[in-house]
Image (cartoon, rainbow, N blue to C red):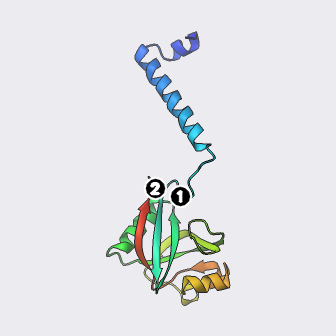
């Protein structure tokens, strides 16, 4: 073992812990760079909403968003997802758009209210670039593993 490593970690226990930490980091980096990445979000949660007889999905990326969805699923007063429309499917399978920067509101303006199919027809300019369906209800939350 090289002298700088021993000088940095004088005890055998610390050297063993450092070696395990380095091996763990190398494994994590190798796994992160693997080309077989899942298509589902790797962190956060995936919320499915029902609007009328249609559904759409949003990738929740922050603890605040996840907590808002959990409250909306339960008895929380802020049930309306309100977010910015972005082109691309992301986790919103079957659509050419998805929602980012979502918050949950008790009330929103009517301009961004509508069905997912109306957003699909109008594109990301629907509702001035925002989507906030008044009758949306969280039907499930799938947490990343």
Q: Nearer the viewer, residue 89 or 110?
A: 89
**Where does label 2 land, which residue?**
144
Q: Based on the displayed image, in which of its 4 quarters is residue 66 positioned?
A: bottom left
Marks 1 and 2, the one that precedes in the sequence: 1
> Eyeballing the image, is 78 above or below 114?
above
Q: Is residue 65 left or right of residue 32?
A: left
Disc 1 and disc 2 in contact, CB within 8 angstroms: yes
At 55% from the left and 15% from the top, the residue drawn is 5
SS class, disc 1: loop
Most extreme residue toward the left, as rendered? 75
Task: Count neighbours of disc 2 (C-alpha within 10 A) and say few if under 14, some if 14 to 19, many if 20 or more.
Answer: few
SS class, disc 2: loop
Task: Count neighbours of disc 1 (C-alpha within 10 A) and say few if under 14, some if 14 to 19, many if 20 or more.
Answer: some
- x and y percent of residue 74 in the render? 33, 73
At 36% from the left and 71% from the top, the residue drawn is 71
- x and y percent of residue 49 in the render? 46, 76
Residue 125: mark: none
- x and y percent of residue 36 in the render? 60, 48
**Where does label 1 land, which residue?**
41
- x and y percent of residue 28 in the render? 54, 38
Q: If the image is split into quadrants, where does the N terminus sit?
A: top right
Q: Nearer the viewer, residue 26 or 35?
A: 35
Q: CA distance from mark 1 to mark 2?
A: 7 Å
At 31% from the left and 76% from the top, the residue drawn is 75
Q: How many marks are shown on the rendered structure?
A: 2
> Eyeballing the image, is 28 above or below 12?
below
> Eyeballing the image, is 76 above or below 18?
below
Most extreme residue toward the front, as rendered? 36
Q: Is residue 107 left or right of residue 115?
A: left
């Amino acid at each position: 073992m090289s002298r700088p490593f021993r000088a940095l970690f004088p005890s055998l226990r610390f050297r063993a812990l450092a070696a395990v930490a380095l091996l763990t980091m190398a494994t994590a980096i190798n796994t992160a760079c693997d080309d077989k990445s899942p298509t589902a979000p790797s962190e956060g949660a995936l919320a499915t909403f029902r609007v009328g007889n249609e559904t759409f999905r949003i990738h929740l990326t922050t603890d605040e968003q996840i907590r808002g969805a959990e409250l909306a699923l339960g008895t929380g007063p802020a049930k309306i997802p309100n977010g910015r429309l972005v082109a691309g499917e992301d986790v919103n399978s079957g659509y050419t758009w998805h929602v980012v920067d979502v918050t949950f509101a008790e009330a929103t303006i009517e301009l961004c209210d509508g069905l997912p199919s109306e957003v699909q027809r109008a594109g990301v300019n629907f509702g001035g670039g925002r989507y906030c369906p008044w009758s949306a209800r969280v039907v499930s939350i799938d947490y990343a593993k």
